[in-house]
Image: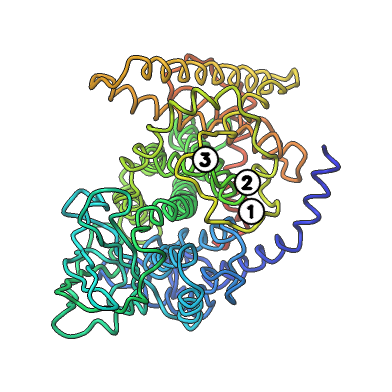
Amino acid sequence: MVTSLLDDRAAAQPREDAVRARVAELEARFGDPTDPDNPVGYTALLEADRAAVPFAAGEALLDDFRIAEEYVPRALGGRLDGMDTLVRIMRPVFRRDVGLAMGHGMTTFMAASDVWAAGSSRQRHWLAGLLRAGGKAAIAQHETAHSNDFVRSQVTARRSGGGYLISGGKPMVNNLERAGALVLFCRTDPAPGSGSHSVLLLEPGQLTGARAAVTARRTPVGLRGCRFAGVEFDDCPVPGSALLGPEGSGIRTALRSFQISRTVIAATAVAALDTSLRTAVRFDRERSGGWQAGGGGRDGGRTGAALTNAFVNLLLYDALAVVATRALHLLPAETSVYSAALKYLLPRVLTETMYDLSIVLGSGFYTREGTLGIFQKHLRDVPVLSLGHAGTVACQATVIPQMPRLARSSWFVEDEAPAGLFRLHGDLPPLRTERLSLACGRDSLSATMLAVSAGIDGDGPVERTLRTLAHQLVGEFRDVRGRVLALEAAGAQATARPAKFALMDRYALLLAAAAVLGLWDQARHGPDPFLADPSWAAAALHRIARRLGTRVADLPAECETRIRHEVQLRFSTQTSYDLYSTPIPG
């Protein structure tokens, strides 16, 4: 097994070297964000945020880096070779400014992913050329009049001659005013059903005159630098060639692309939590000279616990993020569950992490300027990522209907996931979007929890704790399965609905636990001594078990000491707090 792992790592090394080089170049271009003289540092970006304008210096930097090529597949002349690569490239941007990352890039990627998945060869090559030339794309799916229920579209497109006449409006479209391409979700059949909607690929510059009008720009509370505007159509003619995929395929296209966008955006959001943790560590060091494992600082025990809790939160969330991202390539049929679980956990992890860090910051929590100001900005920006048609309720609606089938035919029956799912730097096959399934009835990630928990060896206090926690979580999983089956047997009762939401919450946490165990199991043979240590995995499972209401013993002192040391070490060595341990400036 070890020999096979080394062989796989050697085969993936050229790709890994290229990714690291691009990440390092982007980090170097951004420089130290805490330097007040840095034109793309916190001082400048917070000034743009207060003015509610795009961060011009940051956008110029990304244009010069040719960031749009990261959204274009290699087959179309770009640099996109995997979703894991895109996540790692975008984390330096999210680490500085979520608004910059979304406004300048990820909105374009969300639109483009529909085209790569469903577009004709002509449409794909046209959009690739636009993006590689520095253009942007926008996507119009949100339905704010109907709580973002995107299948209740207020935009209709009816056949007229060889094309369509579009009517209705979309009130909130990011980058609409400066987009060279618009992916528009609209109703093409008044009858209900899965074939009622289609997707059109439009050129906004051609939608002129009285038939299409851009409405006033709106400034949100979060992502203030993003350019949100609306569009109103009045029998606006567009050619039939604008149709993206077959007519009536819009819902299927959207549900597949949600799996990609949910995963990538939720996975890159880890970088904002990374910055928030680093900001709190810096603040504590400056105020108290830092803390040691046994105490120190203004309130050493409480402060140290808050920082380690935030770090563990970040790691357990990133474990599921890494696995969900790699699953897009390795287990595409199962990704609908993993992507939804990841996006569902985002607001919870954000809330708990920010609460932990507020203990450290005290009144500094409210600061909106200087180095501390980035904390407040991330606090306003990151929650916006979990809103809309791909938000919490939509994620629950994706997973809950699948749970009875999973409980019957997959849980405690399925073979464990492939080892490559848990290798941070392992190579990946090409993404095959046609293999993304809306529901396949399989979950091999949870099977990994069973397999790894059965093989945890070692007699040290941390190993014993990890083994105990893993077995307890297997018991929790068995209980979830039993309750899901019992609810199904009881039939469709209104009183069962709250229980289904509670079970989905438990299931999402158990998937995160499975991801932690799988990554730790693979890391035992890897080069990173911290990830090979069972301390972080034990702490992550301990955190998950407590969230589930499981009675657990306190962690061994060795475990907490190791994690506290890692928090300080990564700050001192300027290394990211995520699983990739990326060198960063500042």
| Residue 429 place in picture, x, y as percent | 66, 55
Residue ID for mark 2:
569
Q: Do residues under tags 2 and 1 come within 8 Å of each other at their CB atoms?
A: yes
Q: Quadrant of the rendered structure where residue 110 is?
A: bottom left
Q: Earlier in the sequence, mark 2 or mark 3?
A: 3
Residue ID for mark 1:
573
Label drawn at residue 174? none
Residue 286 in view: no
135 versus 298 height, above or below: below
Q: Residues within 10 Å of mark 3 (few under 14, many from 20)?
A: many
Task: Residue at 83% x, 49% y: name it.
Answer: 7
| Residue 247 place in picture, x, y as percent | 35, 63
Task: State the separation of the CA atoms marked 2 and 1.
Answer: 6 Å
Q: Is residue 69 left or right of residue 24?
A: left
Label drawn at residue 311? 3
Question: Which kind of residue does numbered mark 3 sit on?
Answer: Phe
Q: Give the camera-side residue of 152 and 35.
A: 152
Task: Residue at 65% x, 42% y: name it.
Answer: 422
| Residue 561 place in picture, x, y as percent | 61, 31
